[in-house]
Image (tube, rainbow, N blue to C red):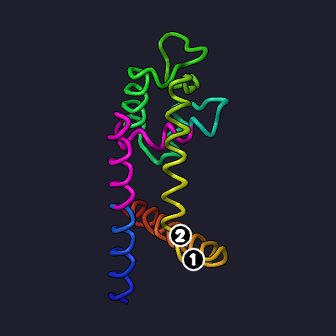
Amino acid sequence: MAESFEQLTNGVTRIYKSIQKIKRLHMDSIGLKGAHVMCIHYLYTHPEGLTGTELCARCREDKAGISRILSDLESSHMICYQNCENGRKYRAKAFLTEEGRIYGAKINKYIEHAVIAGGNGLNASDTEIFYQVLFTIANNLEELCNKIEKRG
């Protein structure tokens, strides 16, 4: 049991650190931060726009973190808001500007390259099983966390 735990945490930590490093290295090359990657990616893949709440759910970030990222992106002219009433940007949909779409296309190329590199040596069946197992473990651990939190 302990060996399985060590393998899981070691593997997940290595993957996470590599992803963070890839984000940082690529974002440095275009003048952004790694934290911006997922917001730009989701806004790029949702041209109809997304609210802060929707980005929180997709990026698995808290409201404060998404607000900071959106503020950074707005200051960099990467996003704009449509129908923003009374300065309530969090409820308004954010959209990529033309400049943001250019960066979104670059980011999606980087993502595609990383996914291909990460799956090197795996066939489609291996990849499907991997993600099925990964999300089963993630769901089970989230359920355990919820049970522990309820116990207080």
Q: CA distance from mark 1 to mark 2?
A: 5 Å
Tally of numbered discs: 2
Residue drawn where x is 62% and y is 40% of the image: 45
- Dot 2 alpha-carbon crowd within 10 angstroms: few under 14, some 14 to 19, many 20 or more: few
Mark 1: which amino acid? Leu
Residue 116, above or below 90? below
Mark 2: which amino acid? Gly
Q: Are marks 1 and 2 in contact (CB under 8 Å)?
A: yes
- From the image, tell me which residue sits under label 2: 119
x and y percentages locating residue 8 in the rendered image = 39, 77
Q: Taking 26 as reference, is 138 left or right?
A: right
> In which quadrant will I find the N terminus?
bottom left
Q: Report the residue that reaches farthest toward the top.
A: 86
- Dot 1 alpha-carbon crowd within 10 angstroms: few under 14, some 14 to 19, many 20 or more: few
**What secondary structure predominates along the stretch shown in magenta?**
helix
Q: Could you say whether the residue bearing mark 1 is in a helix, strand or loop?
A: loop
- From the image, tell me which residue sits under label 1: 122
Residue 21, above or below 44? below
Name which quarter of the figure residue 44 lies in. Answer: top right
Seen from the viewer's position, the closer of residues 118 and 96 is 118
Name which quarter of the figure residue 50 lies in. Answer: top right
x and y percentages locating residue 5 in the rendered image = 36, 81
Which region shows up in magenta? Answer: 18-42
**Res 53 label:** none
Q: Taking 109 as reference, is 21 left or right?
A: left
Seen from the viewer's position, the closer of residues 7 and 64 is 7
> In which quadrant will I find the C terminus?
bottom left
Residue drawn where x is 64% and y is 72% of the image: 128
Instruction: Check if residue 124 falls in the magenta segment.
Output: no
Residue drawn where x is 42% and y is 64% of the image: 145
